[in-house]
Image (cartoon, grey):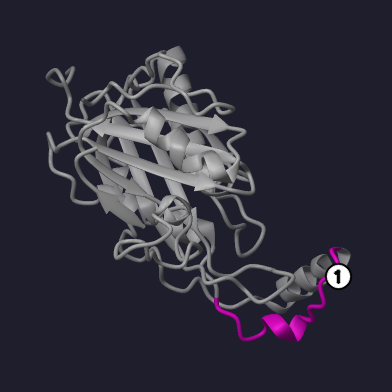
Amino acid sequence: MYVTGGLAPHAHRPVDAGTGRATGWGVPTAPLRLARVITDPAGATGSGGRYTPALAGYLSDLARLHGLRREPDDFAGVARTTFTDLVRPLVAEIADTPVDLIVLAHVTPDAEPGWPASFLTGALPGEPLAFAVADQGVAAPFTALRVATAYARADRFDRVLVVLLDQGTFLTAGPPPEVGAGLVALLLDRDGTLGELSTRVVAGVAPPQARSVLASSLADFSGTLVTGAALSPPAGPQGSAPHPGELPATGLWRELTDRPAGGGPVALADYDPAARCLGICVVTPPETEPVS
């Protein structure tokens, strides 16, 4: 992860992925503001227990269908924390007011077949609509915010929960990547005081273009820029970054933890070479008082 300053809020512009040049169209802010950032709530990263013999057998059969050599005994000593385990503590954190929409985003698959979105829909007040975004790599959180913004604007929602999830236990054809389990939840509300959001996902960006497209998009931005490993400088004293798989879904967004009300502008950006997607989210101080 790379952090820099000195990069005017709300002035960043969409770009043409083929040329890397700004198109001149503004990106509207979301109708809801950032109200809370919840990171790994108490109990969220504790072990959810070990696989039962029945589930171990099921996963072994599933692995063989995809050409992986896994036996039930391979799961016998594995303790995992499922996505449902991770989201369960959120209920106590935000159950004071009805939620209109939940959007989950993850990069890695769950440790077992599960229904974390359905769990939250049944556990939270308001019978919220729920979606999950995956298969976009580290761009998934940005797409989740765009989905949340679109529904909040179309249906005049008052409260939306965007949940980012990382999983450290899953089937893989090779050595397991260095990924941990974790959760970051972004609560968006009309009365939020932590900042206004504007988010964009640029598709079709080839790896050599990623940094130039980002620079063009944020040409007029002044504030703190935080980027994922794929956008970090390739060399120099600040060029080193954590392993890109440590917390691929939540790592970047942990930078918003403890953000004060009215905090300065910050831009979060990440790039997924496999999906060829560049995600950019700008958080700026609210321009007006919250709507009561």
Of the 4 image quadrants, the one containing the N terminus is bottom left
Q: Nearer the viewer, residue 90 or 67?
A: 67
Q: Is residue 281 magenta?
A: no
The answer to which quarter of the image holds residue 75 is bottom right
Give the residue type at disc 1.
Answer: Arg
- Dot 1: element: helix
Which residue occupies 28% across, 46% down?
37
In-image side of 214 versus 53 (left or right)? left
Q: Nearer the viewer, residue 9 or 83?
A: 9
Which residue occupies 40% across, 42% down?
269
Residue 189 visible (yes or no): yes
Which residue occupies 20% across, 45% down?
5
In-image side of 1 versus 266 (left or right)? right
* Rendered view: 89 above or below 270: below
Circle count: 1
Dominant secondary-structure state across the stretch colored magenta: loop
Q: Position of residue 255 (x, y in %)?
A: 28, 51
Q: Position of residue 8 (x, y in %)?
A: 21, 25
Q: Position of residue 100 (x, y in %)?
A: 41, 28
Q: Position of residue 97 (x, y in %)?
A: 29, 34
Residue 99 visible (yes or no): no
Q: Nearer the viewer, residue 70 or 177?
A: 177
Of the 4 image quadrants, the one containing the C terminus is top left
Instruction: Give the magenta part as a residue range.
Output: 66-79
Q: Which residue is mark 1?
A: 64
Q: Nearer the viewer, residue 260 or 25?
A: 25
Q: Residues within 10 Å of mark 1 (few under 14, many from 20)?
A: few
* Rendered view: 225 above or below 128: below
* Rendered view: 36 above or below 32: below
